[in-house]
Image (cartoon, rainbow, N blue to C red):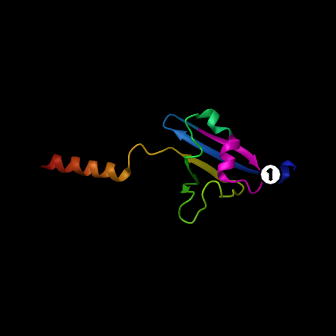
Amino acid sequence: MSDGDLITVEVAFALPDKQRIIEVLVEPGTTAFQAAERSGIVKVFPEIDLESSKMGIFGQTLGTKGLKPPKEHELQPGDRVEIYRPLIADPKEARRKRAQKKKEGEA
């Protein structure tokens, strides 16, 4: 297979103080999960667990809204695979706590 048969994709991960986007040449038909593995991003961020991490393409979470999960979603040229960090707090719970605090401040 020559380089002409390969497609270019990116794999991205970010922490509050450090981020990395790695360009990867892959064969057509490569999945988001495979690209994340091949990128070597886990060497840069050893805290990433690819098996349990949610992934997306340009802000669209894979495995939701009719998109296939990372191990099935085949990449297109120019796609960026985003690896998402787990949430520290449930957004609904955080909103509830803020509303409660505001209510207590008004009383």
Please state the extent of the stretch shown in magenta in the rendering. Answer: 20-39
Q: Residue at x 67, y 43 (%)?
A: 37
Q: Count all numbered tags in the image, as a single digit.
A: 1
Of all residues shown, which one is farthest toward the bottom?
Answer: 66
Q: Position of residue 80 (x, y in %)?
A: 64, 51
Q: Residue at x 84, y 48 (%)?
A: 3
Q: Position of residue 84 (x, y in %)?
A: 53, 46
Whether residue 4 is situated above or below residue 20 in the rendered picture: below
Q: Which of 10 and 47 lies nearest the eye of the viewer?
A: 47
Left or right? Give the position of 86 relative to 77: left
Asked if residue 28 is among those painted magenta in the image, a careful observer would answer: yes
Crowding at dot 1, Cα within 10 Å, few <14 / some 14-19 / many 20+, comes out as: some
Left or right? Give the position of 7 relative to 70: right
Q: Position of residue 70 (x, y in %)?
A: 62, 54
Q: Residue at x 38, y 45 (%)?
A: 89
Q: Secondary structure at mark 1?
A: loop
Q: Position of residue 54 (x, y in %)?
A: 54, 50
Q: Quadrant of residue 73?
A: bottom right
Q: Residue at x 65, y 45 (%)?
A: 36
Q: Which of 18 and 63 lies nearest the eye of the viewer?
A: 63
Of all residues shown, which one is farthest toward the front?
Answer: 51
Whether residue 82 is situated above or below residue 42 in the rendered picture: below
On the image, numbered disc 1 is attached to which residue?
6
What amino acid type is highlighted by mark number 1?
Leu
Left or right? Give the position of 44 relative to 4: left
Whether residue 48 is situated above or below residue 80 in the rendered picture: above
Q: Which of 13 and 73 lies nearest the eye of the viewer?
A: 73
